[in-house]
């Protein structure tokens, strides 16, 4: 059932790619896709087609349903209990605050209370020392 998990992962990655390109188009990225949003949409469509094909194959169906139930239980656990134990990475904080706080590739710290405020959608300001991210060769 690794294919099932991989296909779902591809769909989520392509969705994230498109959403980040639309919401934060001007942030520095270490890698720029040659095909951009159209390429991500095509890749996501191919992954969705593969997911449908997995469900249409009767030999895979029992295993796929078992894995789907396992995933749903995992999401429910996260929604009920796991969500209260999150610790944000710098990249996650950057994404959740739409680039206002946290700079990828720069070391900094935020308190647990500040991270919880970000997860709740708050915009508590912190005094993060200004620094410039290391410049990576773009090419």
Image (tube, rainbow, N blue to C red):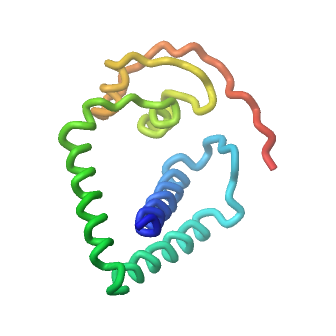
Q: Is residue 67 visible?
A: yes
Location of residue 55 by image quarter: bottom left
Count of numbered labels shown in the rendering: 0
Q: Residue at x 30, y 79 (%)?
A: 61
Is residue 134 found left or right of 11 in the rendered image?
A: right
Location of residue 33 by image quarter: bottom right
Q: Is residue 11 visible?
A: no
- Image location of residue 73, percent across then percent down: 22, 54
- Location of the N terminus (image quadrant): bottom left
Q: Nearer the viewer, residue 30 or 84?
A: 84
Q: Residue at x 42, y 62 (%)?
A: 5
Q: Residue furthest left?
A: 80
Q: Is residue 49 above or below residue 92?
A: below
Q: Nearer the viewer, residue 19 or 50?
A: 50
- Image location of residue 76, percent across then percent down: 21, 49
Is residue 104 found left or right of 54 in the rendered image?
A: right
- Image location of residue 27, percent across then percent down: 61, 42
- Image location of residue 26, percent across then percent down: 62, 45
Q: Residue at x 26, y 58 (%)?
A: 70
């Amino acid at each position: 059932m690794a294919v099932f998990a991989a296909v779902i992962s591809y769909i989520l990655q392509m969705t994230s790619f498109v959403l980040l390109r639309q919401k934060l188009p001007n942030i520095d990225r270490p890698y720029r896709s040659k095909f951009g949003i159209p390429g991500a949409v095509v890749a996501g469509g191919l992954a969705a087609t593969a997911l449908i094909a997995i469900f249409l194959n009767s030999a895979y169906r029992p295993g796929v349903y078992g894995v789907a139930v396992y995933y749903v239980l995992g999401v429910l656990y996260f929604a009920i209990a796991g969500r209260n134990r999150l610790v944000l990475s710098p990249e996650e904080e950057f994404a959740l605050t739409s680039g206002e706080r946290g700079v990828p590739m720069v070391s900094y710290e935020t308190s647990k209370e500040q991270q919880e405020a970000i997860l709740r959608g708050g915009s508590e300001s912190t005094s993060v020392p200004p620094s410039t991210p290391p410049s990576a060769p773009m090419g």
